[in-house]
Amino acid sequence: MLKNPADKYRPFPPVDLPDRQWPGRVLTHAPLWCSVDLRDGNQALAMPMNVSQKLELFQTLVKCGFKEIEVGFPSASNTEFAFNRRLIEEGRAPDDVWLQVLVQAREELIDKTIESLVGARKAIIHLYNSTSPAQRRVVFNMSREQILQVAVRGAQMVKDRLSRLRGTEVRLQYSPESFSATEVDFAREVSEAVMDVWQPTPDRRMILNLPDTVEVAMPNVYADQIEWMCRNIRNRDSLIISLHTHNDRCTGVAATELGLLAGADRVEGTLFGNGERTGNLDIITVALNCYMHGIDPRLDFSDLNAIREVYERCTGMTVPARHPYGGEFVFTAFSGSHQDAIKKGLAEWKSGSQTHWDVPYLTIDPADIGREYREVIRVNSQSGKGGVAYLLESQFGIALPKDLQREFGPIANDAVDRLGREVTGLELKTMFWREYVERLHPWQLESFATESRDGVVNCRAQLLRSGEPVELQGRGNGPLAALVHGFGQAGLPRFEITSYSEHALGAGEEAAAIAYIQIKDHTGRPRWGVGVDTNLELASVRAVLSALNRGVA
Ligand code: KIV
Ligand code: ZN
């Protein structure tokens, strides 16, 4: 890299708009959306989609609720043309969906494009030519006036051929391509020249798409450009101002959101942001950003996993694990403090005490987009007891008492640390079983029987101690008290039970019970034991023996 980048690169000039209004505005409704997956997204693929892949993605876009879909560049290839024809001839587009096609301002391309639309119910013809100084100089070697004439001639050619689309409701769209790198006054001049040809009215508006073809500045600059255009262009009320951002500086979403504040009506983009270079705007992100502020996006992403699957299959692209909303890890917390906060937040939400979603670390309820709470918490060596407890409870119904969570959390963490990787819920359960339930040495239960008379319980316990039979007899006000008494009577180490809880594991007659017992031995040191049995009384006895066994190194 250069020591002084200013020798080679220069800052982007700001727009002169001292009384800009957009910073003070708030988004209150969703824009019109147009998917350009099948055109801009497709042309950026190493292996462009074939007709059947395009059809599958088209159906998915329709299912998501897109009413405007740029289906291709029909003059560019036979596949593109054939795809258009299939959509129209097989009646695949619902009546309320506009088929949008892109075309450059060249006569033979316009002819072919119009031909591809014959028989369509609703069509948007999208004409573009590039207007920035670099494109004028490097690609076209044309003056401003010559570039303006390219746009005007193209607009006229489109207009002259509209009679070939009898029976089709047609909307016209113009893009000064590379708008964000174009001087705003020249972008306005070219756009107004096209408007002079197409003569839009408030009842028959045209779309003026203002692309951030390559992100060349910060998103506030794009917003200024959009507000400047909205305020300075003639007959604003005859226009649908549309945004089309790319993501070269990784601020495509921000540029679109600020562009909406600046007065735009419509947004073009793709699912998961597929598109040239660093991608087009990710429409899902902007739509769900609206949703998380309580704005109905008028797009349905309630089964985002399924949409992602179709997207990945058709495009061959992969949604990165950290991608907003759709990425694998988006609803996953690895750190213990995050897990704890999420667990508490989800519990509060489930209790119904809050009217509006306010769960720490989760911007929206994953369930709203078909993702699961189960995905929220995973456990690695950075996790705390909260994550461990959550997984045991959510996957196996093992509801550890708080104090036991505190005891088992560090034990699990040490084991996970040794493994040096994330662990599954099943692995955690195995660790838990090994630490508590399967502690069978030195004490093991052979049988336990009680009989009760006048409120006093007598017990007889047949145990093994390091394989040698031991019989205990004791009495108390319950089976556990009787067992503790039995140990004392036999001159074995004394202990007391300081905490007890149990619950069913699963349902039905054969369901096991799990008992959690904390004891304190003669040293006063507390420790937990856990027992599982189809008989609750036996589960408790096993829990006592587990606690005793855990005290033996
Ligand atoms: O990025 C762009 O400018 C485009 C135009 C054709 C709208 O894709
Ligand atoms: Zn583009």
Image (tube, rainbow, N blue to C red):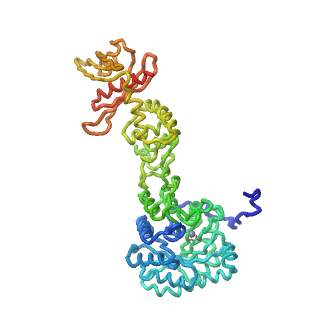
| In the image, residue 294 above or below residue 170 | above
Query: In this rendering, would 453 be left or right of 374?
Result: left
Q: Determine the residue positioned at 26% across, 39% down.
A: 508
Closest to the observer, 433 or 197? 433
Quadrant assignment, res 540: top left
Is residue 252 left or right of 291 when viewed as pictured?
Answer: right
Q: Give the quarter of the figure containing the C terminus.
A: top left
Q: Position of residue 231 (x, y in %)?
A: 62, 71
Which is more toward the observer, 355 or 435?
A: 435
**Quadrant in the picture for residue 143:** bottom right
Q: Residue furthest front?
A: 467
Question: Can I make out residue 78 in this image?
Answer: yes
Asked whether the viewer can see residue 32, the reply is: no
Q: Position of residue 74 (x, y in %)?
A: 49, 78
* Quadrant of the picture in which ligand 2 is shown: bottom right
Q: Which residue is rendered at x = 31% and y = 39% of the image?
A: 506
Q: Quadrant of residue 56?
A: bottom left
Q: Which quarter of the image is occupied by the N terminus? A: bottom right
| Picture coordinates of residue 7, whole percent (x, y) | 77, 62
**On screen, residue 99 above or below 421:** below
Q: Is residue 30 above or below residue 338?
A: below
Please determine whether, in this image, residue 190 is positioned above or below residue 274.
below
